[in-house]
Image: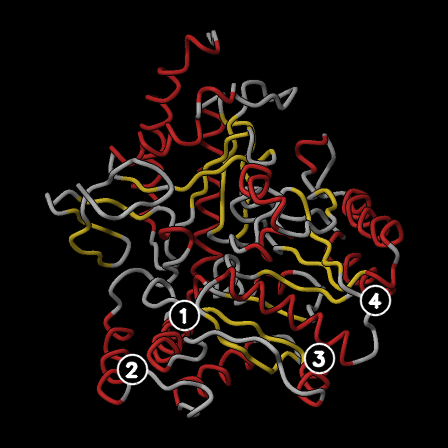
C-alpha cells in the first residue's frame, strides 16, 4: 500500500541511487536514463560539484524570502543567465518549474501591455499540438486535447495555429517555402483575431513532448519574428525543455535568427537537483511594469538561495564540460543511429530532432503516414518493454494526444559513445519484441 498517487495506478521499483547516466533500484537493477527523466537531468545524476555547492549554501541559509532579503546565490545565477541570453534579455524572475515560468511570461507580457497603453492586447497565440504546462493558464495555450479538454470550462482557451509538421503534411522541411507556409498561418490568425487584441505568440523552438522533437522547417523561425514585429506581438520562447544546452546551444532559439522578447526556462537549469525555473525578459518590457507599480505576480520559493546555488553550479558544469558541444556531437551520432534503426524496423516512420532532443515516430504505413491503431497504446507499451530491458525512454502521442505514437530519446548531455551503444542496443531489442507483439494486429510480413 502507498499513500502516494500520481497519474494512474501503476507502480514502479523504488529508486536506490543514481550516478551519471545510470540509476539503480532497491533490488540492485541498473537502468540507463535515456530520457534524462522527463528531459530534465541535463548534466546527469549526482554530480559532485553541484552537491558540494548545495552543501555550502545549506550551511549558510536554505531560505530567504525575496521581500525580506536579496541573496548572493540568486543574484549570481541571474547574472549568469542574463549573460547567456540574446541581447537585451537581462531581467530574470525565478520560479520553481516550467508551468510557473510560462505563467510568469504571459503575465509579464500582459502587464507590459497595460503599462504601455495597449489594454486591448490579451490573446496569446500558440500552436497545436503543443504543451506549455499543466496549470490552467499554461493549459490555455497548450494544444493537446487529452490534457486540456477536461478543464475547458474552467479556463479561457487561447487561439491556435498548426504546428509545422511538414513530414505529416508531405512537405519538404528543407524548402524555405514550407517554412513560410506554416509561419504565414500566424499572420492569418493575428488578422482573424484582430491585431490589436493579440498580445504574444508562444512556441518551443524545437518541439517537446507534444510533437516529439519537431524541428521547424527552413525559414519558419525568421518569418515568425518578422510577423511578430509587424503587428507588435511579443515572441515568447518556451525553452523549458530546449534550454540549458539540450539542443547543442544554451538556448534552442540560438539555432535561428529569431530573437525572443521573453524566454521561459526550467528543467535543465535545475537539472533535477532542485525545482527551479526562470522567466527572462527584455528590460524594455520590465522597466515600464516596475514603473507602473510593480510586477503583480510571485511565488513563495522564487529565487530560493538553495535552488539558485544548485542552478549556478549546473550552469558551471554545462560550461566547464562543454556540454553544448557534446550535445551536438553525440546528437548527430544518435540521429544517424536512429535512422539506422529506421532502416531495420519498418514500424519507424520518422526520425527527427536536434542535439540530444531526438525522437522517432511509429507508423503503420510510411507512405500514407497512417499511425498505429490507437488501441495498441504503442507509446506506453514500448516504454514498458524498454524499461524491462533497463532502458528508460519517454513517450507521447504526436497527433493532438489522441494517436501517433512517438518515443523521445534524450539522454543526459554527458553521454559518450559507449552509452549510445547501450541505448541503441536497448532500442533495437525493444523494437524486435514490440514488433513481434503487434505483428498480428498489423498483419505485417
Give the Cα separation between the discs numbered 2 and 1.
24 Å
Q: State which tag comes first along the sequence, 4 or 1.
A: 4
Between disc 2 and disc 4, the foreground one is 4
Q: State which tag comes first along the sequence, 3 or 1.
A: 3
Q: State which tag comes first along the sequence, 2 or 4.
A: 2
What SS does tag 1 mark?
helix
Which residue sits at x=44%, y=38%? Answer: 395
Q: Quadrant of residue 8?
A: top left
Give the Cα separation between the discs numbered 3 and 2.
31 Å
Which residue sits at x=55%, y=81%? Answer: 83
Task: Tell me if mark 4 has few (under 14), some (14-19) or many (20+) residues whose alpha carbon lies within 10 angstroms of its own.
Answer: some
Viewer-proximal residue, 441 or 289? 289
Q: How is the image coloured?
A: secondary structure
Q: Which mark is residue 62?
A: 2
Q: State which tag comes first along the sequence, 3 or 2.
A: 2
Between disc 4 and disc 3, the foreground one is 4
Q: State which tag comes first along the sequence, 4 or 3.
A: 4
Q: State which tag comes first along the sequence, 2 or 1.
A: 2
Q: Is the C-beta separation of discs 2 and 4 under 8 Å?
A: no
Q: Position of residue 206 (x, y in %)?
A: 59, 52
Q: Which mark is residue 285?
A: 3
Q: Is the C-beta separation of discs 4 and 3 under 8 Å?
A: no
Residue tagged 4? 120
Amino acid at each position: 500500500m502507498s499513500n502516494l498517487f500520481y497519474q494512474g495506478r501503476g507502480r514502479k521499483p523504488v529508486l536506490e541511487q543514481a550516478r551519471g547516466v545510470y540509476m539503480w533500484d532497491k533490488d540492485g537493477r541498473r537502468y540507463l536514463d535515456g530520457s534524462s527523466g522527463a528531459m530534465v537531468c541535463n548534466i546527469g545524476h549526482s554530480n559532485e560539484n553541484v552537491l558540494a555547492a548545495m552543501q555550502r549554501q545549506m550551511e549558510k541559509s536554505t531560505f530567504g524570502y525575496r521581500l525580506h532579503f536579496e541573496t548572493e546565490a540568486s543574484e549570481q545565477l541571474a547574472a549568469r543567465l542574463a549573460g547567456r541570453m540574446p541581447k537585451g534579455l537581462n531581467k530574470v524572475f525565478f520560479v520553481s518549474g516550467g508551468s510557473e515560468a510560462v505563467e510568469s511570461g504571459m503575465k509579464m507580457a500582459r502587464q507590459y501591455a497595460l503599462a504601455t497603453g495597449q489594454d486591448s492586447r490579451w490573446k496569446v497565440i500558440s500552436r497545436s499540438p503543443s504543451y506549455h504546462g499543466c496549470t490552467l493558464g499554461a493549459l490555455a495555450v497548450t494544444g493537446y486535447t487529452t490534457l486540456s479538454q477536461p478543464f475547458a470550462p474552467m479556463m479561457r482557451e487561447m487561439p491556435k495555429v498548426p504546428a509545422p509538421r511538414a513530414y505529416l503534411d508531405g512537405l519538404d522541411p528543407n524548402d524555405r517555402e514550407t517554412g513560410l507556409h506554416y509561419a504565414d498561418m500566424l499572420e492569418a490568425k493575428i488578422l482573424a483575431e484582430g491585431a490589436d487584441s493579440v498580445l504574444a505568440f508562444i512556441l518551443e523552438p524545437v518541439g517537446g513532448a507534444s510533437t516529439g522533437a519537431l524541428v521547424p522547417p527552413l525559414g519558419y523561425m525568421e518569418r515568425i519574428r518578422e510577423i511578430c514585429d509587424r503587428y507588435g506581438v511579443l515572441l515568447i520562447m518556451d525553452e523549458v525543455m530546449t534550454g540549458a544546452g539540450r539542443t547543442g546551444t544554451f538556448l534552442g532559439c540560438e539555432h535561428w535568427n529569431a530573437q525572443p522578447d521573453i524566454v521561459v526556462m526550467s528543467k535543465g537549469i535545475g537539472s533535477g537537483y532542485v525545482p527551479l525555473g526562470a522567466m527572462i525578459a527584455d528590460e524594455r518590457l520590465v522597466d515600464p511594469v516596475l514603473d507602473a507599480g510593480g510586477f503583480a505576480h510571485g511565488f513563495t520559493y522564487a529565487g530560493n538561495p538553495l535552488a539558485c546555488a544548485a542552478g549556478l553550479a549546473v550552469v558551471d558544469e554545462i560550461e566547464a564540460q562543454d556540454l553544448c558541444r557534446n550535445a551536438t556531437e553525440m546528437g548527430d551520432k544518435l540521429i544517424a543511429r536512429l535512422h539506422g534503426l529506421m532502416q531495420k524496423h519498418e514500424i519507424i516512420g520518422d526520425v527527427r530532432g536536434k542535439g540530444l532532443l531526438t525522437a522517432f515516430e511509429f507508423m503503420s504505413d510510411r507512405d500514407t503516414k497512417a499511425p498505429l491503431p490507437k488501441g495498441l497504446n504503442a507509446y506506453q507499451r514500448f516504454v514498458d518493454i524498454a524499461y524491462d530491458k533497463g532502458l528508460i525512454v519517454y513517450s507521447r502521442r504526436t497527433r493532438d494526444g489522441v494517436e501517433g505514437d512517438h518515443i523521445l530519446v534524450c539522454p543526459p548531455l554527458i553521454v559518450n559513445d559507449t552509452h549510445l551503444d547501450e541505448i541503441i542496443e536497448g532500442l533495437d531489442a525493444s523494437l524486435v519484441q514490440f514488433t513481434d507483439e503487434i505483428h498480428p494486429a498489423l498483419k505485417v510480413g
